[in-house]
Amino acid sequence: MQIYVRSPKKIVATIEKWLADKVSSAGAHGCVVGLSGGIDSALVAVLLRRTFGSNMLGVMMPCHSLPEDQQDAEKLIDVFSIPSTLVDLSATYDSLVKGLEESSVPLRHIALANIKPRLRMTTLYAIAQSKGYLVCGTSNKAEIIAGYFTKHGDSGADIWPLGDLLKEEVRETSAYLRVPEDIIQKPPSAGLWKGQTDENEMGLTYDDIDKYIATGNVKESVRQRIEERYRQSVHKRELPPVCIIPKD
């Protein structure tokens, strides 16, 4: 699906300069990014590696995750010689869930699932603060518009280099940088539970969201679904509202 005319070469050059500027202006030394085995984090990691060399860190954070996701992350690490570390959050997750269950508060399935990205956010910030790095998020424009991210989870980052890219641009730019093809082609998934995929959970395809953003020319049912998701997720894209007390 060809919608935007922005070339991968232009995208890479723009993002790499932007990354360098943002890190420099923050007085930081580099960036940290979570490696999920998916295309978005793969593209961010490669861009960081190209921009900062060894002054970046890819962090694998399995949390009862599928083994193949970690294998894909490890493949990316090997291909691009990405500095990396692994923090297994499975036991941490189990301990927290056990404590919550003992509180006698009934927990919804999605609430339990969202603990995982929030633990990852906490982990990334602990590492980033220790190394003087920024936390680099991996959300793309389609996800941001659709509100498809966990509040204070994968949205918890200092910078979003892919935030202006459609999903198709993420794919094309990843191919341009020679990200392994099986990572590019795997069904996008937040890995919240076995068999979960982004598109099934949203009830939308990324192609539909891309087309809506770029042209607005989509089926009415698709338009309504996207705009409903956008309205419902406004709070995810804004700072908490502040109650303003009038002056006497």
Image (cartoon, rainbow, N blue to C red):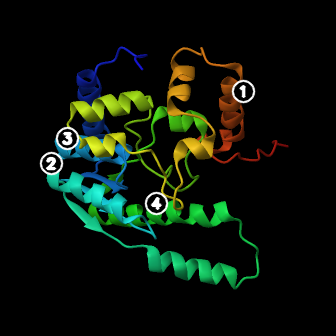
Q: Determine contact: label 2, label 1, CB under 8 Å.
A: no
Q: Is 143 on the left-hand or right-hand side of 21?
A: right
Which is more N-terminal, label 1 or label 2?
A: 2
Q: Is residue 15 visible?
A: no
**Quadrant holding the C terminus:** top right
Q: Is residue 112 visible?
A: yes
Label 4, label 2: how many angstroms apart (C-alpha)? 23 Å
Name the residue nearer the viewer: 78 or 103. 78
Which is more N-terminal, label 4 or label 1?
A: 4
Label 3, label 4: how many angstroms apart (C-alpha)? 22 Å
Which amino acid does the dot numbered 1 rest on? Gln
Q: Which residue is denoted by mark 2 in the rendering? A: 53
Q: Which mark is residue 51?
A: 3
Label 3, label 2: how many angstroms apart (C-alpha)? 6 Å
Q: Which residue is denoted by mark 1 in the rendering? A: 224
**Quadrant holding the N terminus:** top left
Q: Determine contact: label 1, label 4, CB under 8 Å.
A: no
Name the residue nearer the viewer: 62 or 245. 62
Q: Determine contact: label 3, label 2, CB under 8 Å.
A: yes
Residue at the location (49% across, 52% down)? 190
- The secondary structure type at the circle numbered 3 is helix
Residues packed near mark 3 inside 10 Å, few (<14), some (14 to 19) or many (20 plus):
many
Which amino acid does the dot numbered 2 rest on? Gly
